[in-house]
Image (tube, grey):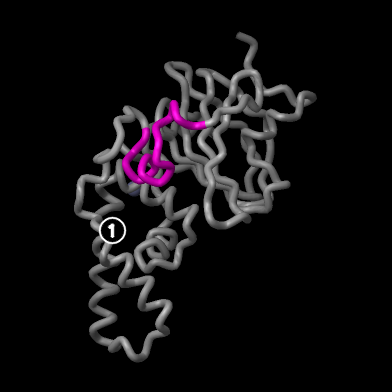
Amino acid sequence: MICYHPEHEMLLDYASGSLEEEPSLVVAAHLAYCELCRGEVRSLEDLGAHLLDEAGSSEMETGALDAVMERLDSPIDEDPNALPTLKDPVLPGPIARYIGTGLDGLRWRRVGPRVEEALLVTTNAKFKTSLLRIKPGTVIPSHTHRGREYTLVLKGGIVDDERHYRRGDLMLADSEHEHRPVAAEDEECICLAVLDAPVRFTGFFTRLLNPFLGGSSPR
Ligand SMILES: [Zn+2]
């Protein structure tokens, strides 16, 4: 049961092809879990196709038209969890295809006593995109954000502000909120994190790099 979804505007941008590559990866991976949002994106794409018919392609900028057509061509009706080239029990198809390997094929580095991070190579330098592997029960120190951070849970869970994010749920964080997420106790947590601010504004998990902040629960 998916409880936390991308905002409507994000799905609209995704459906119209105007969402940038990195947040698009977040949406595509969420869609792999979420039938509700798959239905919404399909409706938006149908609407986009209808509007294209109505408007006539000559009135649209070429780039915008190409972007929409590219989105319309993408096979959203295929089984989005399918992993055609590799077997990975955790990664949804869109992420596995994007990185071209499974979790074990990534270069993990320790960013705290209980957190490992694997940076993903993406197109836009303004985004920091990574997979995070967090030991059960790890407490992330209280902090705020300067940009927006999208965190999609792929395994395990995160509890934040009394909300429990599980597999497929999307956690949004921005400069408005101070928060203190905790990895759920039952199993390790793996998530995809995309931060839309310059790299120097590190994401909340990389705050663990600062030894004075600590960042792990005493276990
Ligand atoms: Zn959804």
Name, please, the residue furthest toward the top. 219
Q: Could you tell me which residue is drawn at 33 percent across and 30 percent down?
A: 88
Question: How many labels, in total?
Answer: 1
Residue 86 in the image: x percent, y percent? 30, 34
In the displayed structure image, the side of residue 174 where residue 47 appears, left or right: left
Name the chief secondary structure element in magenta.
Answer: helix
Q: Could you tell me which residue is drawn at 36 percent across and 50 percent down?
A: 28
Q: Could you tell me which residue is drawn at 46 percent across and 20 percent down?
A: 188
Amino acid found under the numbered disc labelled 1: Glu
Instruction: Check the image and report above or below for 83 versus 48.
Output: above
- The one nearer the camera, 54 or 171, is 54
Instruction: Check the image and report above or below for 146 versus 68.
Output: above
Residue 14 in the image: x percent, y percent? 39, 61
Label 1 belongs to which residue?
40
The stretch of residues the image draws in magenta is 91-106
Residue 197 in the image: x percent, y percent? 65, 53
Which quadrant does the C terminus fall into? top right
* Residue 92 is inside the magenta segment: yes
Residue 148 in the image: x percent, y percent? 59, 51
Q: Could you tell me which residue is drawn at 49 percent across and 61 percent down?
A: 20
Which quadrant does the N terminus fall into? top left
In the displayed structure image, the side of residue 163 where residue 143 appears, left or right: right
In the displayed structure image, the side of residue 7 where residue 193 appears, left or right: right
Name, please, the residue furthest toward the right. 212
Please tell me whether mark 1 sits on a helix, a strand or a loop.
Answer: helix
* Residue 129 is inside the magenta segment: no
Establish whether ligand 1 lies closer than 8 Å to the Cβ of label 1.
Answer: yes
Number of residues whose C-alpha sits closer than 10 Å to that of mark 1, classed few (under 14), some (14–19) or many (20 or more): some
In the displayed structure image, the side of residue 115 where residue 16 appears, left or right: left
- The one nearer the camera, 62 or 27, is 62
